[in-house]
Image (spheres, coloured by chain):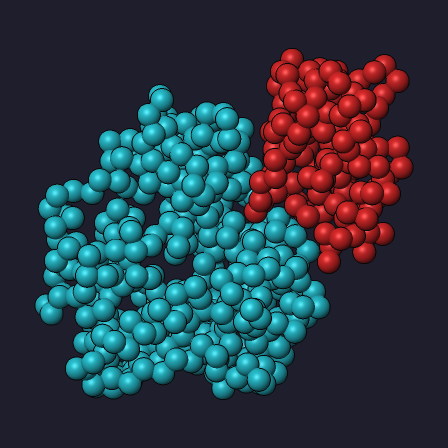
Chain colours: A red, B cyan
């Protein structure tokens, strides 16, 4: 069933269905996966992390809410939040429409990037993980 | 454990997203909660409510019996009309909320919640001892479909022979729909105009009639709706959800249901003495509506605060799709219940501002709901 969910090849994934993308300038963009947005369905509210705040890896930094459910946003990478996607305040549906692009949640200046990345799943592992969840 | 299925399950399995709702396999949405919500507010939607409890009570003492178990006054009912009421435990806690329809002097039809079906029927049976009344649980033999929205009458009329404009609010009528004899009531749980159709002689093992009526309604333009929009619609209308907003720990005076408690009924009723005591001593908490002033969605169980002090709790909350902001039903200490009072809701780590507002309904009833266009 994993073919139903988009899982881009250039990202790292968490067991809580967040993703992380390394940028050339050393920062990391994070968000929630296609699987997560499909499970939540119609996203109506996003609680963004505060810019400038510190976070550890897999600390709760915000939340993504649908009509019925609330899902914590765990930060896949520890560091400092340097930017949050404020577009989501008025258009939370961007996460449904484009979870890996316009629906990004925050930009992190990592503190221990390599160590943190080593603890995340690659696309192949995440694809298998999602397939197992679907059963 | 296998989930229980309703008469219309075959449709849900094919088109809906099914969840476990109190042991029933029910659709939470078909296309989406938000489009289904708007369909009902602006046009017409249909809900499978066959999981609810339905009982026929018949016999010379039926009225007397019902007046003993519920707080409202059943003796005031005219034939083919219904009323909303609660039934209480002896300690004043709410056992359930229900609608009672009078068929004739000795026959009444009772509709209550799905989650309390077994408990309610046992309660009714137990308290019917000594009364000359027969109770028949029709829940599995009768399907139930709600048609709701400003276009409910127009849409249902396409497949119904009876002139629906003659059926007033909270009235019950016999009608033929899709060629089948049914009962219908001008009631619902969305705040909108609409009907609840009761399809008799429709056992779970042979649900053909219910599926035919459902499909005919879809063909007539009604949007199939799941429990998700049913919840967001009733919340905007300020209607209680049993198990969340009212329960055995809550009495009707706290829940702003004083209007369904008729202390002057000559033979009393279960819970009367305890309720009189509550009335005398005053309620400790009271139900309120809360509108979020700042961004944030209140949810069941969140704390309500004034300054640093917890003054209450949210019992139902969510984003109101027709209003665009978060709303909640909750309970606060009496002194904070005045409309306009500023409160905070603890949403995870944040304290988010809201205020006490009118919640019956939350929306402007000249714009939405069954009263629109009637002023």
For residue B316, say whether it is visible: yes
Relative side of B316 to B82, left or right = right
Residue occupying image coordinates x 27% and y 63% = B87
Residue B126 drawn above or below residue B342: below
Coordinates of residue A109 in the picture (x, y in percent):
75, 16
User: Where does the N terminus of chain B fall, quadrant-wise?
Assistant: bottom right
Residue occupying image coordinates x 74% and y 21% = A107
Instruction: Give A132 or B196, whichever is nearer the viewer.
Output: A132
Residue occupying image coordinates x 15% and y 55% = B274
Coordinates of residue B29 in the picture (x, y in percent):
63, 57
Instruction: Give A18 or B140, whichever is nearer the viewer.
Output: A18
Coordinates of residue B51 in the picture (x, y in percent):
49, 69
Instruction: Give B124 or B356, whichever is nearer the viewer.
Output: B124
Residue A89 found in image quarter: top right
Residue occupying image coordinates x 17% and y 54% = B275
Looking at the rendered structure, the number of numbered marks drawn on it comes to 0
Coordinates of residue A7 in the picture (x, y in percent):
84, 42
Relative side of B191 to B288, left or right = right
For residue B162, say whether it is visible: no
Relative side of A94 to B255, left or right = right
Residue B189 drawn above or below residue B14: above
Residue B210 drawn above or below residue B354: below
Residue B285 drawn above or below residue B24: above
Residue B243 found in image quarter: bottom left
């Amino acid at each position: 069933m994993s073919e139903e969910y988009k899982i881009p090849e250039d990202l790292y994934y968490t067991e809580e269905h967040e993703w992380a993308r390394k940028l050339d300038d050393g920062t990391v963009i994070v968000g929630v996966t296609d699987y997560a947005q499909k499970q939540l369905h119609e996203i109506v509210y996003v609680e963004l992390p505060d810019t400038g705040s510190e976070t550890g890896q897999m600390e709760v930094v915000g939340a993504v809410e649908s009509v019925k459910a609330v899902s914590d946003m765990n930060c896949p990478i520890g560091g400092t939040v340097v930017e949050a996607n404020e577009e989501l305040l008025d258009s939370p549906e961007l996460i449904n429409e484009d979870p890996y692009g316009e629906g990004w949640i925050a930009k992190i200046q990592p503190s221990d990037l390599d160590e943190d990345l080593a603890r995340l799943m690659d696309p192949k592992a995440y694809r298998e993980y999602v397939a197992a969840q679907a059963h | 454990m296998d989930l229980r299925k309703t008469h219309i399950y075959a449709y849900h399995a094919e088109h809906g997203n099914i969840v476990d709702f109190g042991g029933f396999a029910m659709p939470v949405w078909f296309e989406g909660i938000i489009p289904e919500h708007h369909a009902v507010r602006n046009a017409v939607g249909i809900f499978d409510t066959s999981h609810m409890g339905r009982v026929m009570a018949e016999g010379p003492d039926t009225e007397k019996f019902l007046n003993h178990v519920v707080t409202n006054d059943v003796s005031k009912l005219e034939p083919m009309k219904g009323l909303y009421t609660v039934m209480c435990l002896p300690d004043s806690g709410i056992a359930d909320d229900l609608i009672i329809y009078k068929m004739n002097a000795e026959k009444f039809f009772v509709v209550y919640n799905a989650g309390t079906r077994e408990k309610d029927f046992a309660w009714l049976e137990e308290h019917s001892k000594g009364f000359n009344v027969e109770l028949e649980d029709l829940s599995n033999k009768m399907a139930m479909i709600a048609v709701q929205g400003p276009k409910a009458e127009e849409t249902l009329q396409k497949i119904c022979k009876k002139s629906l404009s003659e059926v007033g609010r909270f009235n019950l009528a016999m009608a033929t729909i899709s060629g089948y004899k049914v009962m219908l009531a001008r009631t619902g749980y969305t705040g909108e105009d609409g009907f609840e159709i009761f399809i008799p002689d429709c056992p779970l093992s042979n649900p053909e009639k219910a599926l035919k009526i459902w499909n005919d309604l879809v063909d007539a333009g009604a949007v199939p709706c799941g429990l998700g929009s049913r919840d967001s619609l009733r919340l905007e209308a300020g209607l209680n959800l049993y198990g969340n907003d009212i329960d055995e720990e809550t009495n009707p005076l706290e829940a702003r249901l004083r209007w369904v408690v008729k202390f002057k009924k000559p033979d009393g009723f279960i819970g009367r003495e305890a309720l009189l005591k509550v009335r005398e001593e005053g309620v400790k908490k009271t139900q309120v509506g809360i509108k979020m002033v700042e961004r944030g969605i209140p949810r069941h169980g969140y704390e309500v605060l004034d300054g640093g002090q917890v003054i209450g709790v949210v019992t139902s909350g969510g984003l109101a799709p027709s209003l665009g902001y978060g709303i909640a039903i909750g309970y606060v200490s009496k002194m904070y219940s005045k409309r306009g009072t500023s409160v905070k809701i603890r949403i995870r780590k944040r304290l988010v501002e809201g205020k006490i507002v009118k919640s019956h309904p939350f929306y402007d009833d000249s714009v939405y709901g069954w009263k629109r266009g009637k002023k």
